[in-house]
Image (spheres, grey):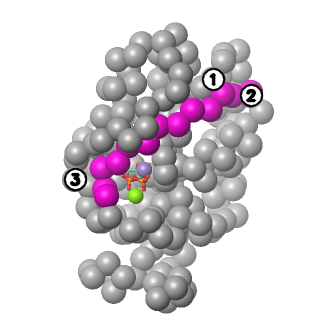
Amino acid sequence: DKDMGTDLKSVLITEDEINAKLAELAAAIDEEYADKDLLIVGVLKGAVMVMADLARALSTPVTMDWMAVSSYGAGTQSSGVVRILKDLDTDIKGKHVLIVEDIIDSGLTLSWLLSNLGSREPASLNVCTLLRKPEAAKVAIDVKWIGFDIPSEFVVGYGLDYAEKYRNLRFVGTLAPHVYGG
Ligand code: PRP
Ligand code: MN
Ligand code: MG
């Protein structure tokens, strides 16, 4: 079924709300890194949209790199097993690094990433995520910039997928339970 309309339960965060929030986050990030060179690291594939829009909302010049890790596969539950599918192209030793994520769910992906990238001796290491599910946290993570705290529902759109679909929606929506058999 290719009709995304019937697969969605509701719109959780609109395109306008996302853009307004990214402008707020970008202002705070601009201030923090005013006198520093900043490398933003997007976590493929979910963070593609937020990376592209956040980067363009920033005034401070940045360089961009990407990591691909996967902990979810095609399911809706985090397995806790993180695999590197693509590592950074650049050495981050001595650099100011900001990890950009679409969502922190259990926190297992980011917890693993923070210790992995942290061991490479960056000058600083911070996190910006568009979404966080506080009720789903399995590990506590220090996240400097959070767009929205959301309930523990399965969300898609604006980079977030279910079985690789719905990433290209301009908004964040909740998925109808019939789609994932809930
Ligand atoms: C999703 C999401 C985060 C991670 C959050 O990525 O984009 O990276 O899960 O979950 P966690 O806090 O429970 O670890 P996913 O592994 O689905 O890969 P994708 O970005 O390619 O969709
Ligand atoms: Mn991801
Ligand atoms: Mg995914």
Of mark 2 and mark 3, the one earlier in the sequence is: 2
- The answer to whether residue 148 of the structure is visible from this angle is yes
Give the magenta part as a residue range. Answer: 60-73
Against 33, is 156 above or below? below
Select label 2 or label 3 by which is in front: 3
Q: Which circle's residue, 3 or 1, is located before the other in the chain?
A: 1
Cβ–Cβ under 8 Å for marks 2 and 1: yes
Q: Quadrant of residue 26?
A: top right
Nearer to us in this view, 139 or 168: 168
Query: Position of 7 compared to 169: left or right?
Result: left
Is label 1 in a helix, a strand or a loop?
A: strand
Q: Earlier in the sequence, mark 2 or mark 1?
A: 1
**Residue behind mark 2:** 60
Q: Residue 27, labelled with which disc?
A: none
* Residue type pointed to by label 2: Thr
State the quadrant of the C terminus: bottom left
Q: Amino acid at mark 1?
A: Leu
Q: Is residue 62 magenta?
A: yes
Q: Position of residue 165 (x, y in %)?
A: 47, 70
Measured in 3D between alpha carbons, the distance from the residue under mark 2 to the one under mark 1, in whole angstroms, is 8 Å
Residue lying at 33% horizontally and 86% vertically, measured from the top left:
178
Q: Residues within 10 Å of mark 3 (few under 14, many from 20)?
A: some
Q: Name the front one of labels 3 and 1.
A: 3
- Can you give x and y, in whole percent of width and height, for residue 179 in the image? 36, 82
CA separation in Å, label 2 and label 3: 36 Å
The residue carrying mark 1 is 38
Does any atom of ligand 1 lie closer than 8 Å to the CB of label 1?
A: no
Whether residue 136 is visible: no
Secondary structure of the residue carrying tag 2 is loop
Q: Residues within 10 Å of mark 2 (few under 14, many from 20)?
A: some
Residue 79 - label: 3
